[in-house]
Image (cartoon, rainbow, N blue to C red):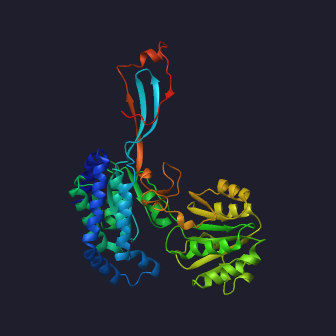
Amino acid sequence: MTIREMGLQAKAASIRMAALEGEVKNKAILAVAEALEKHSGEIEAANRLDMAAAGGLDKPLQKRLKYDQTKIAASIEGLRSLSALPDPVGMTQRATLLDDGLELYRVSCPIGVIGVVFESRPDALVQISTLCLKSGNAVLLKGGSEALNSNRILAKIVKEAAISAGAPDGWLQLLETRADVSEMLKLDDCIDLVIPRGSNAFVKYIMEHTSIPVMGHADGICHLYVDKDADVEMAVRLTVDAKTQYVSVCNAIETLLVHKEIAASFLPRAAEALKAKNVQLRCCERSLPYMEGAVPATEQDWDTEYLDYILSVKVVDSLDEAIEHINLHGSGHTDAIVTEAKEAASRFMALVDSADVFWNCSTRFADGFRFGLGAEVGIATGKIHARGPVGLDGLCIYKWLLKGNGQAVAPYADGTRHFKHIPLDTSFHL
């Protein structure tokens, strides 16, 4: 089957997907969960083939690629949680009485066909496909070539389980090569949205080679700022968690900013805790004396997403300098402040121009599942209809539905009749 044929099939399936009842979609998601459990041995066997061929990959990438019983169980748990969430489709977001007998509703609906290109994480295929299923979208998926065997069996399991429960044939299509992606990017008559997950250069390439709308993020250059009024013990704990809980993800911090007035009390303790986790420290001139074993940072470090046990550290003179640094060098993903001063936190959260801005908690909370969105199809750092973790709501758009009783525009145009524009209770439905 050609990529165009896949796109046309997905387009046809998307019409039926949009009309699926919530009960059918939930049944399909639970069927996927059962199928993953039933075929877990086959999935692991396929993943071992990928792992065996991935010896040349960096350790963080190998960790992402691995899909064992623990990760399969986590996927199953996530699917059951997803099935319990409210149906995002058909929700009345706004209702207005334009005039007697003339009612306007803004109602959520699926985007249609989503094309997603993602990294070498087999669990991402499960998350993305079932989020599209729950939100009523058809999807074309292209995972990393390193996970080809894993993706093949997972796509087959997910697709067949969902179809057996009532999803239309053609709702999920798997692409396998870079050439397939190039062909997909030409399908502006079939695909409604492309979501690329990967490097900055890759996302820019996608944007430059398609006329299809693109939503996504490039780098995950996240910051933790330790304010002068921070609780030192809390700051150390959050630094370690935000950097090392899982280093190879986009919401792990890459730069630690520290107010000059707390540097002497905080940095040595942070260095000790980070050293215990084998983190390499790259420090500015002012932080270097406080952090044993560190090396000098370069200007390039402030703009680098390491995805590894490396952390750049900089001492700043003020809250405003920290904000300026983040807005200049950050990627608009997730940034956090540690402080006991509400005024400082409020200013930080108002002025940092990122999709996720946190106070006294780890940047690792920037995740669709943790936000209660039913996992995520990706992170959006742009400023369109979705921003931050893109879950079910981000995979929906809306349509305007107008219910009348024979009204024409002429009486309103000549002034015979006038609009009332009275808000209606959004619990009303057509």
- Front one among 281 and 199: 281
Residue 296 visible to the viewer: no
* Residue drawn at x 38%, y 58% as measured from the top left: 82
What is the residue that sits farthest to the top in this orientation? 416
Q: Position of residue 188 (x, y in %)?
A: 35, 50
Q: Up-down: is 103 above or below 144?
A: above
- Front one among 202 and 377: 377
Q: Position of residue 304 (x, y in %)?
A: 58, 72
* Residue drawn at x 52%, y 62% as measured from the top left: 366
What is the residue that sits farthest to the bottom in this orientation? 293
Q: Position of residue 277 (x, y in %)?
A: 57, 83
Residue 237 visible to the viewer: yes
* Relative side of 175 to 410, left or right: left
Q: Up-down: is 95 above or below 131?
A: above
- Front one among 278 and 32: 32
In the picture, residue 59 is in which quadrant? bottom left
- Front one among 228 and 395: 228
* Relative side of 96 to 323, left or right: left
Quadrant, the N terminus: bottom left
